[in-house]
Image: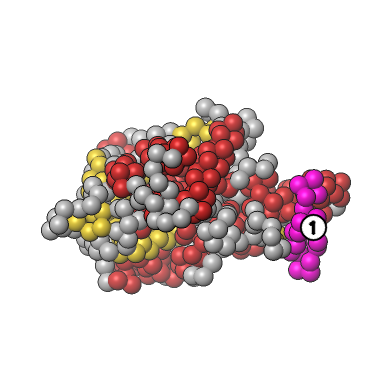
Amino acid sequence: MAPAHPQFVLYNTLERRAEPVNPADPEAVTVYSCGPTVYDDAHIGNFRSFLAADVLRRWLESPLCTLTDDAGRAHAGPRQVTHVMNITDVGHMTDDSSADGGGEDKMELAARRLQESKKAGTAHATADIDPTDPKQIADFYTARFAADARALGLKVALQASDDPTLLPRATDAVPGMIAMIGKLIDRGHAYAVGETGAQTVYFDVQSFPDYGSLSGNTLERLKSGAGGRVESSHQAEKKHPADFLLWKTDPTHKMKWDSPWGSGYPGWHIECTAMSLERLAEPIGRHDIDIHTGGEDNIFPHHECEHAQSCGLTGHSTFARHWMHARFLQVEGEKMSKSTGNFFTARDLFAKGHSPAAVRFELIKTHYRANANFTEQSLTDAAKRLERWRTALRACDDANGPGDRADDARAEFAAAMADDLNVAGAIAAVDRLRSRIASGEIEAGSDTAQTLRDFDAVLGVVELGGGSGPTEMEVAVFADGVEPDAAIDARLIERRDAKKAKDFAKADAIRDELAGMGLAILDRPGGKVEVRRS
Ligand code: AMP
Ligand code: ZN
């Protein structure tokens, strides 16, 4: 039978071309995304990458998405997707382009920063955290990441409320990493240097001829320093300058584990090999995962190293069947940076009154393989456009009868998404259907509403924070009749932090601001705040 819609074609970084997505099982797809390093709040650039992965997984789940199997048979959606996103809470060094894992562990940097801000009396949000305990810092930022991610409709984070194994933490996976490093040594892909009990373990890149295939690097170029600085102090003990760290013995590191090589911590790259294979491949008896995602900076060295380790471990030439990488987000045409004041976290934008739906729309609307340019002005435009989409959906819900299913719009949307996730084309399809509904050109009804909902299940913007399910809030508890709103929750988080810092003027100003919106707030035991209509 001919497929109802064109098959899904996605750019594969490894092959440097767009290819049909060909999972091991077209009815049940596995997706692994490199998640945040929880030493600070995730910024909107991070969320651009995470949302690109979320749109991918939502598209795979859609009834409109068709995949083909090895025999060339078409499989129409919907299908099951298992999506895992890791939380990095150890071993990600500040100099993460260096093969040696140079610089400082980002979690230890966070501890130092927190200590300094406590001394200076500016540690508002983090007032209750013990800076000498990286676990407390990781817990704090992981909870905030999960809250922001849920507000932005990241399905993996919404599902993780019931199944935390979908957001696995690196520190929970260290025993598996130690076992994998031992196996890599046994298989001749890794070697330990130094005295017994104080050893460093490196991956031997020359043992894996395919090293460089993902990023286009060659061992010759890497030897001359391309693709990342190499710490000279480690050169003498390595077989090749590009050999990268698997285990570092370091009794002074705050987070450390016993291992056959000494007490220390794992390299960053082995974390994702462990978590992806353990969570997604091994439970179904496979050696590979279907799609691996990340931002463009992950291609080298992180994913190149992950590919080498994973293939070295399993003895297969494939680890991820498809590699997807999102290009970087710029803000107001420039690189995001704290010094130029164009640096935003998701919660910064919620606190300024922008809705999570508008933020999500802005972060997904540009093709994931083009640099996106984020402006605050376009957030306002996005909010207006989403209001028009909601009005169209209400008109369909309010009409009697099934109305027109708008198969031509479904085909247009599906063709755009199947073409390497052309979200801009998909948005144009929604816009056109909306204007036909508004003008009465097509008959609106429950079937038309279903088509709009099928589109929104992929884009995730129309019903975000509205009727599409619970949006979990960190502080706010919304009374009956008050629409749950992550922006209000973000303001209440700021108020809580202001009170902790004894900045009562700021706390009162936030109360007044909400009163101006017709909302009364009531402090409840346990730190929650009830929001009612006044
Ligand atoms: P990190 O928390 O530094 O480990 O980064 C988490 C993810 O965000 C990685 O996949 C990065 O590639 C991605 N990322 C970082 N900055 C940006 C940016 N400006 N635009 C898009 N993705 C980014
Ligand atoms: Zn990773």
| Residue that protrudes farthest toward the top in the picture | 333
Answer whether residue 346 is visible to the viewer in this image: yes
| Residue 434 in picture, x, y percent from top left | 44, 41
For label 1, being within 8 Å of ligand 1 is answered no
Residues rendered magenta in the picture:
515-534
Query: Toward which corner of the image does residue 285 lie, by quadrant?
Result: bottom left
Q: Is residue 52 left or right of residue 525?
A: left
Residue placed at 35% from the left, 40% from the top?
422
* Quadrant into which the N terminus falls: bottom left
Residue placed at 69% from the left, 63% from the top?
480
Answer whether residue 114 is visible to the viewer in this image: no
Q: What kind of element bears circle 1?
A: strand
Amino acid type, mark 1: Ile
- Number of numbered discs on residues: 1
| Residue 163 in picture, x, y percent from top left | 49, 70
Q: Nearer the viewer, residue 373 or 335?
A: 373
| Vertical side of 486 occupied by 198: above or below | below
- Where is mark 1, residue-wise? 521
Q: Is residue 263 magenta?
A: no
Q: Nearer the viewer, residue 376 or 405?
A: 405
